[in-house]
Image (cartoon, helix red, strand yellow):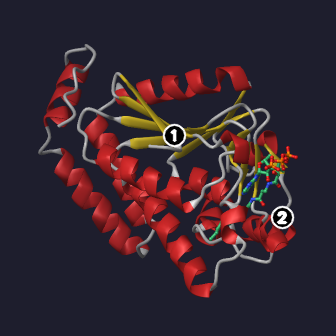
Amino acid sequence: MKNIILKEDKGIAEITINRPKSLNALNSETLKELGTVIEDISQRKDIQAVIITGSGDKAFVAGADIVEMQNLNAVQGRELAMLAQKVFSDIEHMPQVVIAAVNGYALGGGCELSMACDIRLASKNAKFGQPEVGLGITPGFAGTQRLPRLVGKGTAKELIFTTDMIDAEEAHRIQLANKVYEQEELMDKAREMAKKIMSKGIYAVSLAKSAINNGMNMDTESAYSYEADIFGLCFSTEDQKEGMKAFIEKRKPNFKGC
Ligand code: HXC
């Protein structure tokens, strides 16, 4: 891997986008590497949580790589969008919980990458934005779809049409960032949250993720039915038996993740 650093510790995988000279801009090589890492981790039972961050203290990801994009034709532009959309969709649907530790600029494709994650934790110096129309393009890594689902249609349109960059506090106010921390504590806070989630019935967490993600793409009646299916499925797991037994026996559950 040239542009991705992968570290693993006690069930948590930390993925760092590592092109600091370009503020971690996503070129197609980096997107492909990220796709490979995500595919591998998705198959792993020993990894329960993933944290995605950017190298250095200035940027999470400053967008798709403008140098690479400048001479693309229409077909190549569409291919780039499809490549990133597939990788981001794989992130959204991976069984593990994915936390974005947004440690600086999260612009264009960087904001879109953070939105594919389950939870966004931001450092105080983080800046979010969708600057694409200022470059004569639209968001193409699913930002036109994920941003309105997270912050509402009106605010998404304002951010995309004006290209205004917003700070971490404003991102928190509009519910784009879940929490805001000092930069030096961001990664520890992300690990802390990952560990807290991992201490629960992690298989149930994974099922809840699926119910939310898939249910939100269905009509409400189908989504309720899907939720009931998933709820029913929980009763065939060891974790449900252990979780409820532990409650009744007034002790901490010892979950196995199955
Ligand atoms: C390529 C980039 C880059 C990018 C920064 N760099 N962002 N290179 N693609 N997206 C490079 C700069 O060219 C520069 O290289 C180095 O990183 C440091 O950046 P500076 O501009 O010198 O830093 P600073 O003045 O602090 O400004 C930071 C910044 C600015 C505000 C983040 O770099 C910026 O506006 N970047 C572009 C952000 C953007 O428009 N992103 C959206 C891209 S479109 P050198 O060699 O000069 O040191 C997109 C579309 C997605 O994401 C969908 C496509 C289908």
- 148 with respect to 159 (left or right): left
The amino acid marked with disc number 1 is Ile
Give the position of the C terminus as an image quadrant.
top left
Q: Position of residue 78 (x, y in %)?
A: 56, 80
Q: Which mark is residue 232?
A: none
* Figure check: 52 above or below 160: above
Depth order, front residue of 192/69: 69
Q: Which residue lies at the image location 84% right of the left edge and 70% below the top edge?
A: 134
Q: Vertically, is 123 above or below 119?
A: above
Instruction: Kindly identify which residue carries mark 2.
Output: 163
Mark 2, Cα crowd under 10 Å, few <14 / some 14-19 / many 20+, is some
63 relative position to 46: left or right = right
x and y, in percent, of residue 114 in the image:
59, 50
Q: Nearer the viewer, residue 251 or 198?
A: 198
Q: Which residue is mark 1?
A: 99
Alpha carbons under labels 1 and 2: distance apart = 25 Å
| Residue 230 on image: x %, y % | 25, 55
What residue lies at 81% left-to-right and 71% top-to-bottom? 135
User: What kind of element bears circle 2?
Assistant: loop
Q: Residue at the spot x=56%, y=85% of the render? A: 75
Q: Quadrant of residue 67?
A: bottom right
Give the quarter of the figure containing the N terminus.
Answer: top left
- Three-letter amino acid code of the residue under disc 2: Thr
- Describe residue 206's horizontal placement relative to residue 172 as left or right: left
Q: Name the image quarter holding residue 32.
A: bottom left
Depth order, front residue of 63/2: 2
Q: Earlier in the sequence, mark 1 or mark 2?
A: 1
